[in-house]
Amino acid sequence: MTLNAAVAHSAHLLEDDLAGYVIHATKEVFGTMVMMELADCYPLREPVTKFHCSVTGMVGLAGTYTGILSIHCPQGFALRITSNMLGMEVDEVGEDVNDALGEIANMLGGYVKQILSKGGLDINLSIPTVISGEEYTVNAMSDSDCVIIPFVNEGERFLVGLKLRKEG
């Protein structure tokens, strides 16, 4: 799990630097929007591509750099995130959870966009996509050009992944 060499060279970033930006952004978003303090467990020790009873929010990046920023969390933690964001109890995975995880992915994608681009002008973000289920695989997470950061809150672990490629 490493940063793409072309991305590292063109953006003048080391993998640890990019991971640091994602860690900072994730802690900031969760601190202000979700009212949760996080501990990061970077680097990820083992590859993770299969998810069980989980929710994944993703946003695509296109332009000078292309890629996907994703957040993967267990369903129970996704419910807690959503409940905190909305200030009310949410007890089933549905539209509210999809909106919350999509919005978090969108905010994190916007932060990465600012870091990598000239004022955000040469990278576009897609509309967030959210998937959930009993068991699914995210193939982008298995590639070597992916930085994945585990986070923990009250004993529950979730992942934020960033897969990037330099275009042209």
Image (cartoon, helix red, strand yellow):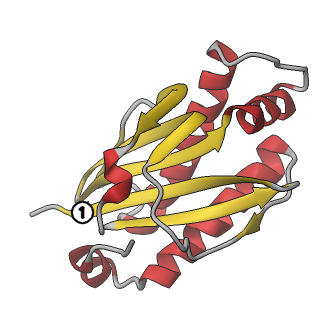
**Disc 1 designates what residue?**
165
- Image x and y of residue 165, in percent: 24, 63
Q: In this orientation, does residue 106 appear?
A: no
**Residue nearest the observer in this picture, 98 or 66:** 98
Q: Secondary structure at mark 1?
A: strand
Number of marks in the image? Answer: 1
Crowd band around label 1 with a 10 angstrom C-alpha radius: few (<14), some (14–19), many (20+): many
Q: Residue at x 45, y 63 (%)?
A: 47
- On screen, residue 6 versus residue 24, left or right, reads left
| Residue 57: percent from left, percent from top | 52, 36
Which residue is drawn at the image coordinates 66% and 58% (left, top)?
26
The quarter of the picture where the N terminus appears is: bottom left
Report the side of 37 relative to 47 (left or right): right
Q: Nearer the viewer, residue 41 or 96?
A: 41
Asked which quadrant contains residue 92, the reply is top right
Looking at the picture, how far across and down is residue 52, in whole percent? 57, 37
Q: Nearer the viewer, residue 127 or 5?
A: 5
Disc 1 marks a residue whose amino acid type is Arg
